[in-house]
Image: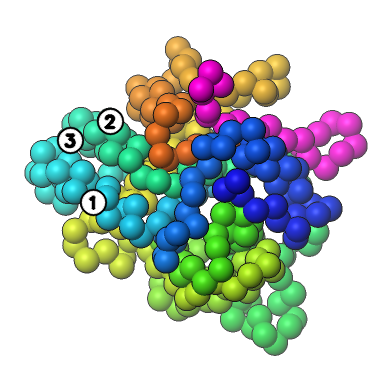
Amino acid sequence: MNWRSVPKSRNTFFHFLDSDISKFACEHEDGLPDLSSASTLLLGSDYSGEKNTNKYSVYSFLVTSLDSLSKWEPKRLSIRRNFFSDKRRMSFKRLGDNQRRRALEPLLEAANSINGLSFSIAINKKCNSLFSDTVPLDLNNPDFYAYKKWKTDVLRKAFIIIHFFGFLLAGCAREGQNVIWFTDEDDIAANNERIYELTNLFSWISSGYLSFNLGHCRCGTSRCDDGSRQIEDFLAIPDLIAGALAEQFDLRTEKASKVFWIHRGDFSDKTRRITWWFSDTKNPLKRLVYIIDPTEKGGKYKYSFFHFHNQGE
C-alpha cells in the first residue's frame, strides 16, 4: 500500500483525512502513486479563493519525484515551442490569452504522465480557525521572534499549507528522501528572508508528523527559475487545479454539498476543460480532493472526500 497511516493525526481533523486516504489506498492498490524509490521528492503548491467573494480557500498540492518530472520535461518543452511565441507564464487567471488557451489541454495532457499525487483541500470560509488560537504560533517565545513581523493571516496560511504538506509527506514519503518545495510567489514567500523563515517553519512543523528522518529540505518559488520556465510550468499544474476548484466551490450549495461536478452549464470554459481533465482516472497523476465545511449540529467540522478512480477497473 502506497500510504503509511499518520499517528500524529489522532484527535484532529487529520484523523478523518488519514482514515479516508488509508481506506481508499487499501481498496485501490493503484489509487496512489508509489514514490518510495525516489531519492528526491518535488513538491509544488498554489492557492486560490482569496477574494472576499470566494466561499472557499483552496490549497492545491502536487507531490512527485525529480525523476518523474524529468520525463515530463520533453513534453513541456515541446508545448513551449509549439504554442508560445515568448516566455509568458501559464496560469488560470490568464487563460483569456489565445496562446495560453490553446496550450491548456496539451499542458494538462502532458501532466498526466507525471507519477505523483494532486491533493487539494478546500476550506469553507465560515469555518473557525483550524488552530486553537487566533495566532498559530507563540510569538512570545524568543525562538519565534522572526515571525512577529508576519501578518497574522499570512502566518496562518503558511501553517495550513505546511501542516498539510507535513501530513502528506508522513503518508507517502520514505526515510532519507530529499524534499524540494516550490510555492506560488505570494505573501508567504515574498522575499529571500521570508523564504528562509518559511523553510524553518517547514522543517519544524513537518517533523512533527514524521516518524522517520528525511534528507535535505529546501524551499523556493518561481523566482528560482533559470529562464526556461520549468518551475513556472510545474507550478502551473496546481495553479490551474486550484483556480478551477475555487470556481466550482463558489457555485456549491448545501443541497449538493456531497457532489463534485464534472460538468455544469454555468462553468466557465476554462473550468469546464480543467475539471473534465481532472476527473480522468487512468493516468499516473492521481487526484484527491478534501472539503471542510462548518457543521450546524455542534461538531467542529464536516468533511467531504472525493477521489477519481475507475470503479470498474
- The first of marks 1 and 2 along the sequence is 1
Q: Nearer the viewer, mark 2 or mark 3?
A: 2
Above or below: residue 82 compared with residue 211: above
Identified by mark 1, the residue type is Glu
Residue to which mark 1 is pinned: 73
Left-right relation of 186 to 50: left
Q: Give neighbour class at mark 1: few <14, some 14-19, many 20+ (Cα, 10 Å).
A: some
Q: Mark on residue 99?
A: 3
Quarter of image, res 169: bottom right
Identified by mark 3, the residue type is Gln
**Which residue lies at the image location 28% right of the left edge and 30% below the top edge?**
105
Residue to which mark 2 is pinned: 105
Left-right relation of 281 to 235: right
Q: Residue furthest top?
A: 265
Above or below: residue 22 compared with residue 209: above
Image location of residue 248, percent across then percent down:
52, 27
